[in-house]
Image: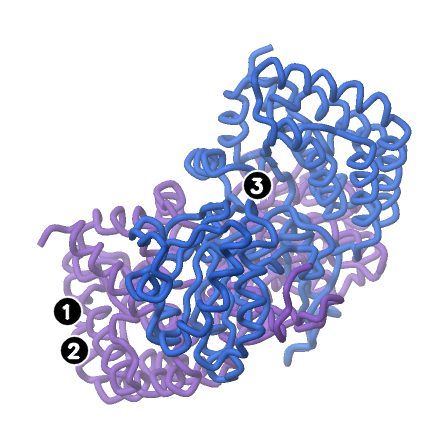
Chain colours: A blue, B purple
Amino acid sequence: MDLKVYIQELGQNARLAGRDMAKANTGAKNQALEEIASVILARQDELIQTNSKDMEAGRANGLEPALLDRLQLTTARINSMAEGLRQVATLADPIGEIANMAYRPTGIQVGQMRVPLGVVGIIYESRPNVTADAAALCIKSGNATILRGGSEASHSNQAIAACIQAGLKSAGLPVEAVQVIETTDRAAVGELLTMPEYVDVIIPRGGKSLIERVSAEARMPVIKHLDGICHVYIDDEADMNKAIAIAYNSKTQRYGVCNAMECLLIAESIAEQALNQLAPKYKDAGVEIRGCEKSKAILKDIELASEEDYFTEYLAPIMSLKIVSDLDGAIAHINHYGSMHTDSIVTENISKARRFMAEVDSSSVIVNASTRFADGFEYGLGAEIGISTDKFHARGPVGLHGLTSQKYIVIGDGHIKQ
Amino acid sequence: MDLKVYIQELGQNARLAGRDMAKANTGAKNQALEEIASVILARQDELIQTNSKDMEAGRANGLEPALLDRLQLTTARINSMAEGLRQVATLADPIGEIANMAYRPTGIQVGQMRVPLGVVGIIYESRPNVTADAAALCIKSGNATILRGGSEASHSNQAIAACIQAGLKSAGLPVEAVQVIETTDRAAVGELLTMPEYVDVIIPRGGKSLIERVSAEARMPVIKHLDGICHVYIDDEADMNKAIAIAYNSKTQRYGVCNAMECLLIAESIAEQALNQLAPKYKDAGVEIRGCEKSKAILKDIELASEEDYFTEYLAPIMSLKIVSDLDGAIAHINHYGSMHTDSIVTENISKARRFMAEVDSSSVIVNASTRFADGFEYGLGAEIGISTDKFHARGPVGLHGLTSQKYIVIGDGHIKQ
């Protein structure tokens, strides 16, 4: 079949299914999520068998071990997919929520009702569990979704999609509410990105090159973050124990994640004291430090950081370091070199904490805690479909509410405008 | 000077001024608004004199009387501009509002803080008072703005801009927070629309061709509505007195506005009763009715509506009319022919009212009141910068909050991730 026609058909199906999903009641949506979880558990042998085809092909194509690991479905991962679906079922239904309902002087009552966005396109890479996670959030938020997984996971994604559609069917919801693009042709993504008439928002989940391509080509809004160049600033009024713990945890708790610290900023007057405690800990953890002239004067055996380093998201046991004059220097550095993702200050001074929160232009600003807390689960969103560093629509971790909008509702009793 | 360089400079200035505006405290922003109002009142003779240059040029260029009227500055209009500025000063400052602050099981506190979008571009047509109105909302919401008014109002807009900058200066805020593009070269708009690095959102205010051009060219998000094809549906369980009043008021209270009714839908079983009362009233008001076959069978002397009519925003004493089977027919008609702007149902049945509110996919859905209530002032937003029929970011009338975003804030006490 012609690719364009095929993707357009998915779009038309999704648009129609989206109308039914918008009206679906909470009970039916939760039932679908529970049914999908049951089908996934019931079919776990089949899923693992299907996944082994993707794994074999991956090995044959020389996929890196880390990617192969992400591709694999195990009993534990299948259980956790089912668990994720059931957790989304327990979340409050955002659709139909009415907020701010109040009488106006004319006598009309005005409020805002939460509604789905419509059709959500999600483009993701090798992890097949995203198929179930993303579908769950779209179902609960009353949206239809078109999913496009990585080609290396295509058999696994199709098998999971079949479970999802079986679950939707038993709950009496349209199976076209969740569609997985079947072809592995890369041009399919191009078609998906250029039909704003059928797709209301696109969420790319994956590496920087995927996100850049999607942002450049999409004709509809995109929920995304490109980089996570996260900072910790140790203020001269920091509690040093907290500062050491937070700066160490933010870098080393996990390296390959977007909310890991990539650059440490320290106020000049306490830099020596802080670095004398921190440097040996980083060294033991195998973290390479690239610092400014002033920090090299203290630490001696570190590399000098280049301008480029301060713009780099290492996602590895490497970090940049800069000694700044004070809070102003820290804020200026973050707003210039940062990526508006997550930045943390360690200070006991409330006035400085307030300034940092107000003036650092990032989607998450943190006081006296690790940057690693910046995610939807830690924030209590229940689940996360992505993180946005943009300001329009959604900012920071995006959960169910990010997949919705609010319309105005007005109730009168025969009111006319004078 | 080269046009591109000039517009880029405005963008750079706006970006820098936006940073200061984001930090500006409520007192300074309110003071600026009050000062601008005072300067405008103090310079009213000068403003009227300057405006007369635009009026003369307009007459010489054969501008239509309606446009000439919109262009004119009178003492009353200048007073109302000043009044508008002072009203915005009385509104609550949205910036820095912290919402949903709550403890998480880990012990961190998570909430959301409201922040400005950054730089707002506004492109508008002949009414010079928009210069002051739009500037006021941007100042209060902590944004910088670049304004581009109609070329026919350019002298008036520059004179008002001078008042605004004088007011900003006395309040100690950067004068570049509000910049008016000086050249009347149309290419300036093209430059403005293609610098997403300096402009975070564009708001076009004017006719359909302006909005279509802006939507097609803009490289940043656009807050807009294209059409206001608004419906009133009279249900078979409507209170007939309310129905007559609402259907009449929605069409005739004012014709040239986006929230006027353009199409009346009536449930078949009460169509004859409703039309027998309504048709003479519309006739007296000089409203032309274009109806379906069934309505022509009742009213006889009306024109038949074409398919095209049901997609038309007349903005004139013309309306389309359709007799539908029931609520389902009304919802299907509105979701197909409507423009997602404002639609109203008249019914005493709460179950039908609930369905209409949930299933009609418009930015304002109304029960038992006139469509004419759909605006920011009636909704209590205090002021309105536009109406959005999109779902992303802002929907319906857009006030101060639509010019803001929310970032996450996290407060801990040395918390690290386990």
* Numbered circle sitting on residue B53: 1
Which residue is at 61% across, 17% downward? A183
Label 3 neighbour load within 10 Å: few <14, some 14-19, many 20+: many
Q: Which residue is mark 2?
A: B49
Q: Nearer the viewer, mark 3 or mark 2?
A: 3
Q: Nearer the viewer, residue B120 or A157?
A: A157
Is there one chain holding both mark 2 and mark 1? yes
Q: Quadrant of residue A200?
A: top right
Check contact, mark 2 vs mark 1: CB within 8 A. yes
Q: Chain of mark 2?
A: B
Left or right of B320 in this view: B175: left
Q: Which residue type carries mark 2?
A: Gln
Q: Nearer the viewer, residue B96 or B333?
A: B96
Distance (Cα) linking label 2 and label 1: 7 Å
Left or right of A142 in this view: A238: left
Q: Chain of mark 3?
A: A
State the SS at label 1.
helix
The quadrant of the picture occupied by the C terminus of chain B is bottom right
User: Where B84 falls versus A36 (above or below)?
Assistant: below
* Numbered circle sitting on residue A203: 3
Distance (Cα) linking label 1 and label 3: 51 Å
Q: Chain of mark 1?
A: B
